């Protein structure tokens, strides 16, 4: 591995530059309005698409002026469009003002399920209005008798649709149009059927917890009892009198929801699938009689997979994996045609694919790299298709693994980031971008290697953006991956301020070679204002193996802060860096690390901390206990890792920012820290965004937010 110092790179590239340069408030060729209001650099996206057959897919074209959508059947070779549905029909038949199509599912060639008026609940969950469309008989039927529903789940035989409404499960019978309610104990903030609670959604990525058996006779679902979980509330300021929002939020060490698996069988009865572990984040049908369920203990260092026979009501331990730190959930949990289970595991030191039969687990892929996502397992061809962060951690490529020859092969461009969706029939949708190439989207075939470009969004104006320079940063006896943006007309004989952008949380990355989003575009804007902008992936981040990632276990905020401070110290010694003007910014975990860094080092003159955790006892149980154990079992580290406890050590000017309606990292975190700063007579600035959640979204809100941050950094 060749180490490249930023110092040598700058001298070799810019030593001869003799252009005048105004260090502060230089004229950028784009404005904050260009980023946040006009979305000048936002990459174009394709309409939603769904594969139909070897030659056709469906696309949804939104009609902004009419608040409606048209659904087209498109030929991938000829690009011919056939209109198959216009949601104006919904507006007229059901008196809807908004009929934007958010989802479109195919039951057969003439029957479709259409979702409109979708509204988010939390990060991933949503509810909406759903309609069954019969285009042959020109018939439209609403699914659900009143109000919005969640997660319509179509049975394999296309005869039934299960859905969730008001925390209960209903079944809609397509032929008779009848509805049957199959659970009756659902109640907000008490019992959830077919969906999950806030913390399962946030930390395990679960939303819909229903699935039909292959023969469509039984429905598997999760029941969540959150009655004993403490209630969290915050006020929303939309009216003269604030309204109170309440939901169940289990914090570290506190009571967590009790979950249980159930099977609704043949319109007759509910069978409880008995499991004895704490968490059940993954489950699926193995066959019509058998369920595979993955469980975790509370500390998440003991993973078990059970096979449960619903006829005999017996369970068998299929697989177990323990780790002295924690076991991450597999990125794939799939039953193969052979009956084997396919999962990923880090037990070799890197995340790789394993097949599990009745006797043992067999490692399939090998090498010093982490598999990101397994996309296809072809047993006939003995080939695995997957994505991985190769050939460098900031890049993401599509690869294949030959199981017979134990060999690796690249299937994509390796100069940026590839995101792939399998479409069926050996076709896949590939999206490619890097720090200087916007979206390139194509449909490709694994069989005949054909490629049909659907979108190539390149613009001459993109050349005004400063390109990321990726490099290895030597820290003691190891190296960290990093990038930097340097001001235009960089002159190595002058002094420049440096802005460090940090996230740094477990299994995360800010060092990515992909098209930039709003926050990174703002950092580009700050480079035009004279800042050298740097981002470093500290120890504890992902894509470099289990030991690199898990070093922060039980000691959050220790090694991450050490690496960020050593990176700052490294840059402060460079001859073109003004070490009296070093700043740091971070959001969420990055906001936390910004605080911890400012409480551990005096080199940071200015810091911006957005929506930070300020004490891990305030954050949710699943995330926090995975990385820190419970407060009772790790009290000294909880205290050491708390900005609230370290508040008297704050050094530098701090801008603390938080949304008052943050359901993820509660506003209370910043209020508790502010109270402690006041106690210690520490000067700081605080900015609150009414009714804003963790993302502090909205075009005008973000314009004001990033404008305020710009002024804070540029002010003398």
Image (tube, rainbow, N blue to C red):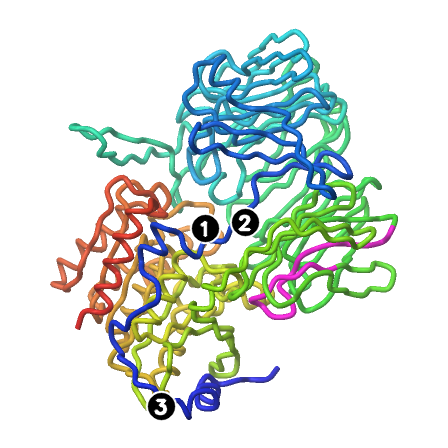
In the rendered structure, the answer to whether residue 366 lies left or right of residue 484 reads right
Cα gap from disc 1 to disc 2, whole angstroms? 8 Å
Vertical position of residue 283 compared to residue 117: above or below: below
Q: Which residue is mark 3?
A: 18
Q: Residue at x 20, y 30 (%)?
A: 242
Determine the residue positioned at 81% across, 44% down. 358
Q: Is residue 109 above or below residue 581?
A: above
Residue placed most toward the observer, 287 or 511? 511
x and y percent of residue 582 in the render?
Answer: 29, 76
Q: Which residue is mark 1?
A: 625
Q: Point out the stretch of residues depicted in magenta.
A: 381-399
Mark 1 surroundings: few (<14), some (14-19) or many (≥20) residues within 10 A: many
Report the residue marked by disc 2. 300
Secondary structure of the residue carrying tag 3 is: loop
Comparing 227 with 138, the one in front is: 138
Q: Position of residue 412 (x, y in %)?
A: 70, 61
Question: In which quadrant of the rendered image does the C terminus lie?
Answer: bottom left
Question: Was residue 266 drawn as part of the magenta stretch in this picture?
Answer: no
- Residue contact at pointers 1 and 2, CB within 8 angstroms: yes
Which marked residue is nearer to the observer: mark 3 or mark 1?
3
Which image quarter: residue 523?
bottom left
């Amino acid at each position: 591995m060749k180490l490249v110092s930023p110092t040598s790179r700058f001298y070799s590239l810019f030593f001869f530059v003799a252009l005048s340069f105004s260090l502060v408030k230089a004229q950028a060729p784009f404005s904050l309005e260009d980023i946040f209001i006009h979305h000048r650099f936002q990459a174009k996206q394709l309409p939603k698409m769904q594969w139909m057959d070897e030659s056709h897919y469906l696309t949804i074209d939104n009609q902004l002026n009419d608040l409606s959508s048209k659904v087209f059947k498109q030929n991938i070779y000829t690009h011919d469009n056939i209109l198959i549905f216009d949601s104006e029909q919904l507006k007229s038949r059901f008196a809807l003002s908004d009929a934007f199509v958010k989802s479109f599912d195919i039951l057969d060639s003439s029957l479709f399920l259409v979702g409109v008026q979708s509204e988010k609940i939390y990060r991933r969950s949503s509810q909406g209005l759903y309609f069954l469309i019969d285009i042959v008989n020109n018939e439209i039927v609403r699914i659900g008798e009143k109000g919005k529903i969640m997660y319509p789940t179509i049975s394999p035989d296309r005869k039934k649709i299960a859905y969730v409404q008001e925390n209960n499960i209903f079944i809609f019978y397509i032929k008779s149009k009848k509805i049957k309610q199959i659970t009756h104990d659902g109640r907000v903030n008490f019992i959830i059927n077919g969906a999950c609670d806030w913390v399962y959604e946030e930390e395990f990525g679960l939303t819909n917890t229903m699935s039909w058996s292959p023969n469509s006779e039984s429905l598997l679902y999760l029941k969540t009892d959150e009655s004993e979980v403490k209630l969290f509330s915050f006020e929303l300021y939309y009216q003269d009198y604030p309204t109170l929002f309440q939901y169940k939020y289990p914090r570290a060490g506190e009571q967590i929801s009790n979950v249980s698996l159930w099977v609704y069988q043949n319109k007759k009865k509910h069978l409880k699938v008995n499991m004895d572990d704490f968490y059940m984040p993954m489950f699926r049908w193995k066959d019509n009689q058998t369920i595979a369920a993955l469980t975790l203990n509370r500390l998440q260092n003991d993973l078990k997979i059970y096979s449960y026979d619903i006829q005999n009501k017996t369970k068998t331990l299929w697989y177990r994996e323990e780790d002295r730190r924690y076991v991450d959930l597999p990125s794939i949990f799939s039953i193969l045609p052979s009956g084997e289970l396919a999962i990923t595991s880090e037990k070799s030191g890197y995340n790789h694919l394993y097949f599990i039969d009745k006797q043992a687990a067999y490692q399939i892929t090998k090498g010093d790299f982490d598999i990101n996502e397994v996309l296809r397992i072809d047993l006939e061809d003995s080939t695995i298709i997957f994505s991985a962060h190769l050939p460098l951690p900031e890049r993401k490529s599509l690869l294949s693994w030959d199981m017979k020859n134990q060999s690796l092969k690249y299937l994509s461009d390796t100069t940026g980031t590839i995101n792939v969706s399998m479409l069926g029939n050996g076709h896949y949708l590939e999206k490619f971008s890097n720090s200087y190439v916007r979206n390139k989207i194509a449909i490709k075939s694994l069989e005949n290697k054909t490629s049909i470009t659907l979108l190539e969004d390149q613009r001459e104006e993109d050349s005004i953006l400063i390109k990321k320079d990726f490099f290895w940063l030597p820290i003691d006896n190891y190296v960290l991956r990093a990038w930097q943006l340097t001001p235009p007309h960089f002159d190595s004989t002058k002094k420049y301020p440096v802005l460090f952008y940090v996230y740094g949380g477990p299994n995360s990355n800010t060092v990515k070679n992909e098209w930039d989003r709003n926050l990174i575009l703002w950092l580009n804007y700050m480079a035009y204002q004279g800042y050298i902008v740097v981002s470093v992936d500290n120890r504890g981040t992902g894509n470099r193996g289990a030991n690199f990632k898990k070093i922060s276990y039980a000691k959050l905020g220790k090694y991450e802060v050490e690496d960020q401070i050593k990176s700052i110290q490294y840059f402060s010694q460079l001859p073109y860096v003004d070490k009296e003007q070093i700043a740091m910014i971070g959001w969420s975990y990055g906001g936390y690390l910004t605080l911890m860094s400012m409480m551990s080092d005096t080199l940071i003159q200015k810091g911006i901390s957005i929506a930070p955790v300020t004490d891990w006892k305030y954050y949710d149980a699943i995330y926090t206990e995975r990385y820190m154990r419970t407060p009772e079992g790790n009290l000294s580290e909880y205290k050491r890792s708390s900005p609230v406890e370290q508040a008297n050590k704050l050094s530098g000017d701090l801008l603390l920012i938080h949304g008052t309606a943050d359901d993820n990292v509660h506003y209370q975190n910043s209020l508790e820290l502010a109270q402690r700063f006041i106690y210690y007579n520490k000067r700081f600035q605080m900015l609150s965004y009414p009714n804003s959640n963790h993302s502090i979204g909205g075009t005008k809100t973000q314009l004001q937010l990033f404008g305020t941050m710009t002024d804070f950094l540029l002010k003398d």
